[in-house]
Image (tube, rainbow, N blue to C red):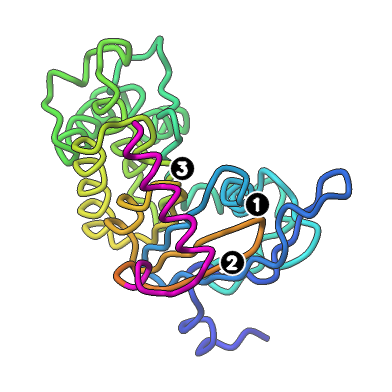
Amino acid sequence: MNDPVAEKTAPKIAVEGLCKSFDGERVLDGIDFAIPDGGSVVLLGESGSGKTLTLKCIMGLVHPDSGSIRIDGQDTVGLRGRERAQLLGRCGMLFQQSALFDSLPVWRNVAFRQMERKELNAAEAHAMAVKRLGSVGLGPAVADLLPSELSGGMQKRVGIARAIASEPEIILLDEPTAGLDPIMSNVIASLIVRNVRELGATALSITSDINTAIKIADQIVLLHEGKVAWSGPPDEIALTGNAIVERFIHKWKMEQAAA
């Protein structure tokens, strides 16, 4: 029998002992972290650190070898069919390259889920899309453009609008500022923070950009070689004395200087 008190106090997302190997190589080695309801956690790390694989496990795209992934106290590992669809229906997703449909106008991209599920007719979907585009600083005229007519920063904004269109409980963000210059990265990070807070959603992001992580996170989890190397609030990451953290920061600064 479920304990209603325990369920009420359970984290929105809790990952415990997550492990995954490919061809005998351990890629995730006991990942642990939790996100409270309404919280924002960023998985930070270099390419190959395990952050993308962790996100795929949470989404159900990859089945872990061991460990648990609990949402509102329910273990979601192994969910299939309707149960998995119901879980994903509670989530909004911002993909790394925005993943917009080139042949559809912006408003159809934003309202894609609602149109596919026949939740809204065309006029209602267009009005909803315009509203969501406004929340990310894009005017009504953008709704009728094609993605190819937009800049990279505008495409990211459309991606955010689509991610929040269904007012999800959970928002998953895959490298939300990748490929953007520092000024636009700050703009996108600010939009993410504002919209996530307005929805009261729980956010999980992955990034290799320290500035983005500091901007959008309540808690940063630094992954290194499939393990949690450090976890803490953003304002402490430069003060940890952790050798892995310091190497990561130094390498990131060198890359930024060379860019």
* Circle 1: residue type: Cys
Question: Circle 1 sits on which residue?
Answer: 57
Depth check, mark 3 against mark 2: the one in front is 2
Q: Would you identify the image quadrant in which residue 94 lies?
A: top left
Point 23% across, 34% down: residue? 128
Depth check, mark 3 against mark 1: the one in front is 3
Kindly check if marks 3 and 2 are in contact, taking CB atoms under 8 A apart as contact: no
Give the percent coordinates (x, y) of residue 156.
31, 31
Depth check, mark 1 against mark 2: the one in front is 2
Quarter of the C terminus within the rendering: top left
Separation (CA) of disc 3 from disc 2:
18 Å
Mark found first going from the N terminus, 3 or 1: 1
The image shows residue 27, relative to residue 122, as above or below, that is: below
* Circle 2: residue type: Val
Quarter of the N terminus within the rendering: bottom right
Which residue reaches farthest right? 24
**Residue 239 shown in magenta:** yes
Secondary structure under badge 1? helix
Mark found first going from the N terminus, 1 or 2: 1
Separation (CA) of disc 1 from disc 2:
16 Å
* Circle 3: residue type: Asp
Question: Circle 2 sits on which residue?
Answer: 228
Mark found first going from the N terminus, 3 or 2: 3
Question: Circle 3 sits on which residue?
Answer: 174
Whether residue 97 sits left or right of residue 22 in the image: it is left
Main structural element of the magenta stretch: helix, strand or loop?
helix
Point 29% across, 63% down: residue? 200
What stretch of residues is rendered in magenta? Answer: 236-259
Q: Would you identify the image quadrant in which residue 181 lies?
A: top left
Point 21% across, 21% down: residue? 143
The image shows residue 87, relative to residue 107, as above or below, that is: below
Secondary structure under badge 3? strand
